């Protein structure tokens, strides 16, 4: 038979192939096993590392960042309530210690303790520490103004109202007031939450890299099994099949765990946390409303009354932007919220049975509070100011303090319930992330199973088979 004619290019390739050292089967198996081991370790580092970082971040959000933010909300509420109690104590007059005065002292003490806790566990560093000291100094100045007002009132000096108004101004002044300083500090802590969420997003961005590594690893496992079957004429390698199964389990579990954790974090932050802040703001604003009503009763000049009334109207519009009547209440009970404001936001967000019932109860009690307040103003319009003050400070049913305490109590219960839900969601998220990260360690067993599965093939070559 005549020699087959080859082109010069094919001849060159044939010569290069003959000169190139051939790769033996053991060498190829060794390279495949090493590549699988490297990819398994890389998969573990990427997956477990991202999940562990997310778990640590979630733990920091629950135990440090959000408590710092909520701590500022508590301080805001206690200071607002202290200002309300100071106004009610001044309105009650007399030389004896009254319930509003005791409440004032309790609120100031609670705010001071929270400030000390915030200073001891400050997550923000030097800048926030200085702000905490500034707030403490302003609170001391506020206490001095209130004390002077009370002393002047007991001595029968009319100028006491000037000091009381100065204290209220110091508390509520936009931008530089005590509450504004507290809110600004809360904003700095909220920036820490934004940075923590960015860390969670970075961990989520590792997903494409994780998927690529997993796909390459799966391809190598399948190729290795096919090579062993073709070279050694064995239909299957149980250990390589188990390694492939472990890879599927690890990747599937990681995907499900990461998805569940992401959903839980969104639920905790976008729903529970947002509602929690909204209710804390409403809680503090309700105290402002009651305090503004007392300041309106205390004022003896029209300018002072107008100023207190404007603050009262602005605060009530933020809670509920219009008067509540039977039609609006009936529609709200059926899920048709026809008004806006903080209480409307909570009612729209509370779509679960018990939560919705609680939100409706708060709304009903707030309407009662506003009805009693209207009765107080009606008595003033009739010239019965003494009766109006009695009804404003009274603690019996149908009196303003009783109505206020009803709303205040149920708002507190709703806040407590939401705080518990937030903590439960975050704890569940942390457990899911840690458990999923541990599952990622299965990827290391893939490398061990690969070496174990290929070991008999190496022995075949050593035995000269």
Image (cartoon, rainbow, N blue to C red):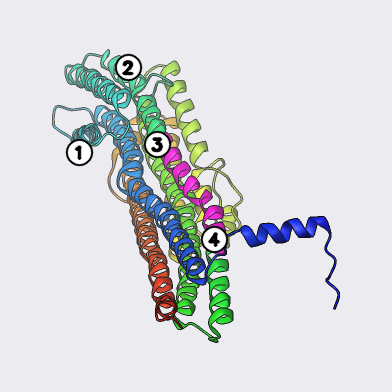
Give me the disc on residue 333. 4
- Which mark, residue 73? none
Q: Which residue is mark 3?
A: 192
In the displayed structure image, the side of residue 167 where residue 22 appears, left or right: right
User: Is residue 410 in the magenta section?
Assistant: no
Q: Is residue 204 magenta?
A: yes
Q: Position of residue 427 (x, y in %)?
A: 34, 58
Q: Quadrant of residue 281?
A: top left
Q: In front: 364, or 339?
A: 339
Residue 376 visible: no
| The one of 393 and 287 positioned closer to us in this rendering | 287
Residue at the extreme left:
96
**Alpha-carbon distance for marks 1 and 2?**
23 Å
Q: Give the magenta part as a residue range.
A: 191-215
* Residue 166: numbered disc: 2
**Mark before the other along the chain sequence, 4 or 2:** 2
Pair 3/4: label in front? 3
Mark 4 lies on a secondary structure that is helix
Residue 41, above or below 325: below
- Measure how far apart labels 2 and 3 are at the Cα level: 34 Å
**Residue at image coords 51%, 51%:** 206
**Residue topped by disc 1:** 99
Q: Earlier in the sequence, mark 4 or mark 1?
A: 1
Residue under the point 47% across and 77% down = 240
* Sooner in the amino-acid sequence: mark 3 or mark 4: 3
Q: Is residue 187 visible?
A: yes
Q: Assign the N terminus to one quadrant of the image.
A: bottom right
**Quick one: SS at disc 1?**
helix
């Amino acid at each position: 038979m005549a020699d087959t004619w080859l082109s010069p290019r094919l001849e060159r390739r044939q010569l290069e192939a003959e000169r190139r050292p051939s790769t033996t089967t053991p060498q190829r198996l060794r390279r495949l096993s090493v590549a699988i081991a490297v990819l398994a370790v890389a998969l573990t580092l990427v997956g477990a590392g991202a999940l562990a970082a997310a778990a640590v971040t979630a733990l920091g959000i629950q135990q440090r960042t959000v408590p710092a933010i909520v701590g500022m909300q508590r301080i805001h509420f206690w200071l607002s309530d202290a200002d309300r109690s100071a106004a009610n104590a001044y309105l009650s007059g007399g030389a004896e210690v009254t319930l509003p005065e005791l409440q004032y002292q309790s609120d100031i003490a609670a705010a001071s303790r929270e400030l000390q806790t915030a200073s001891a566990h400050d997550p923000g560093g030097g800048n926030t520490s200085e702000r905490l000291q500034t707030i403490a100094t302003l609170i001391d100045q506020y206490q001095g103004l209130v004390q002077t007002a009370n002393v002047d009132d007991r001595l029968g000096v009319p100028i006491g109202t000037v000091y009381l108004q100065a204290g209220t101004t110091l508390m509520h002044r936009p931008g530089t007031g005590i509450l504004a300083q507290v809110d600004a500090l809360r904003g700095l802590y909220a920036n820490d939450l934004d940075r923590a969420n960015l860390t969670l997003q970075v961990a989520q961005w590792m997903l494409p890299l994780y998927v690529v590594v997993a796909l390459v690893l799966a391809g190598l496992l399948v190729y290795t099994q096919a090579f062993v079957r073709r070279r050694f004429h064995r239909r299957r390698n149980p250990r390589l099949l188990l390694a492939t199964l472990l890879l599927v389990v690890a990747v599937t579990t990681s995907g499900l765990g990461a998805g569940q954790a992401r959903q839980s974090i969104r639920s905790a932050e976008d729903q529970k946390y947002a509602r929690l802040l909204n209710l804390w703001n409403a809680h503090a604003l309700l105290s402002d409303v009651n305090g503004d009503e007392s300041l309106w009763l205390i004022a003896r000049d029209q300018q002072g009354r107008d100023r207190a009334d404007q603050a009262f109207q602005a605060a009530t519009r933020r809670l509920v932007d219009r008067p509540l009547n039977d039609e609006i209440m009936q529609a709200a009970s059926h899920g048709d919220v026809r008004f806006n404001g903080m209480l409307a936001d909570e009612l729209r967000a509370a779509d679960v049975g018990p939560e919705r019932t609680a939100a409706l109860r708060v709304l009903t009690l707030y309407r009662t509070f506003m009805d009693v307040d209207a009765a107080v103003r009606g008595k003033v319009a009739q010239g019965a100011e003494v009766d109006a003050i009695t009804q404003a400070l009274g603690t019996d049913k149908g009196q303003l303090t009783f109505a206020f305490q009803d709303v205040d109590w149920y708002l507190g219960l709703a806040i407590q319930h939401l705080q518990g839900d937030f903590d439960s969601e975050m704890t569940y998220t942390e457990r899911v992330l840690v458990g999923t990260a541990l599952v990622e360690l299965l990827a290391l067993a893939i490398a061990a199973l690969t070496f174990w599965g290929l070991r008999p093939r190496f022995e075949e070559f050593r035995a000269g088979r």
